[in-house]
Amino acid sequence: MFYFDTTYLWFMLPCIILSLICQVRVKSAFSKYGKVPNSRHLTGAQAAEYVLRQNGVTGVRIEHVAGSLTDHYDPRTNVIRLSDSVYNATSVAAVGVAAHEAGHAVQTAQGYVPNKIRSAVLPAARLGSGVSWILIAIGFLFAYRTANPVGMYCLYGGIILFSASVLFTVVTLPVEFNASSRALKCIRETQLLSGEEYRGAKSVLQAAAMTYVASALTAIMQLLRLLLLARRRN
């Protein structure tokens, strides 16, 4: 009724295509440079430790996590978790990804402001990503069938909650770009990787960063689409 209509084609379909392209680019870049060993023979775990040490950050655990491209930093427990293809791998891609996750730990240790904002928005974003769609569905249902104002209240209430998750994806952009910037700066200045190895790690991180851009764009377009549909129902 409200989800699959002409606005979906104009607002969401291009974003979905962009997201798919970005995902393919990430997998392609990681696959390519995941086969190129780094000259220092450092594993991803060792590279993460190196970046932390170079930035004077201590007390961060580095753990192995199952899966592929499941690497992440958990600020709640101060743990960097590296996937099967990164933790013990000695590839250029593994070093780049591990250094990026270490960059997040450095952000937390140094009180990077956008990171604090992102953490503050997270609870509202989690609530918004779940409850918002229930309210939006109820709102469209009532607004479509009756003139009951309760439907519009639910609809706009859901849109407001959804806006929190949109804000989270937008604030995530500087956090992710900065983590990559910190990682690449450390890699370049300390000659952890050089020449083609450095360019390979940079390609992997740039491809990964574009997935966050696509995610933010998708969220923004979805919000604009919902506002347009709500205006029509009103």
Image (tube, rainbow, N blue to C red):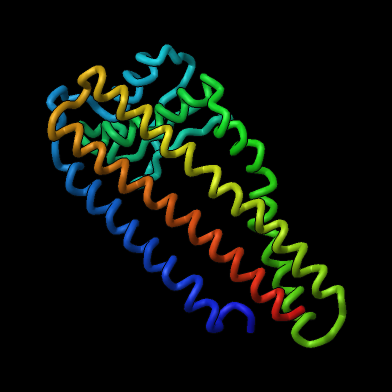
Residue 41: x %, y % from top left: 16, 25
- Name the foreground residue: 210 vs 67: 210
Q: Is residue 175 left or right of residue 120?
A: left
Q: Quadrant of the N terminus?
A: bottom right
* The quarter of the displayed image where residue 225 is located: bottom right
* The quarter of the displayed image where residue 57 is located: top left
**Which residue corresponds to the image point at 86% horizontal and 73% vertical from the top-left?**
150
Residue 188: x %, y % from top left: 24, 24
**Which residue corresponds to the image point at 83% horizontal and 86% vertical from the top-left?**
146
Q: Quadrant of the C terminus?
A: bottom right
Q: Is residue 144 left or right of residue 216?
A: right
Residue 84: x %, y % from top left: 31, 40
Q: Is residue 127 left or right of residue 38?
A: right
**Which residue corresponds to the image point at 87% horizontal and 76% vertical from the top-left?**
149
* The quarter of the displayed image where residue 42 is located: top left
Which residue is most to the bottom? 145
Residue 139: x %, y % from top left: 76, 74
Disc count in the image? 0
When the figure is inspected, residue 31 is found, relative to residue 162, above or below; the finding is: above
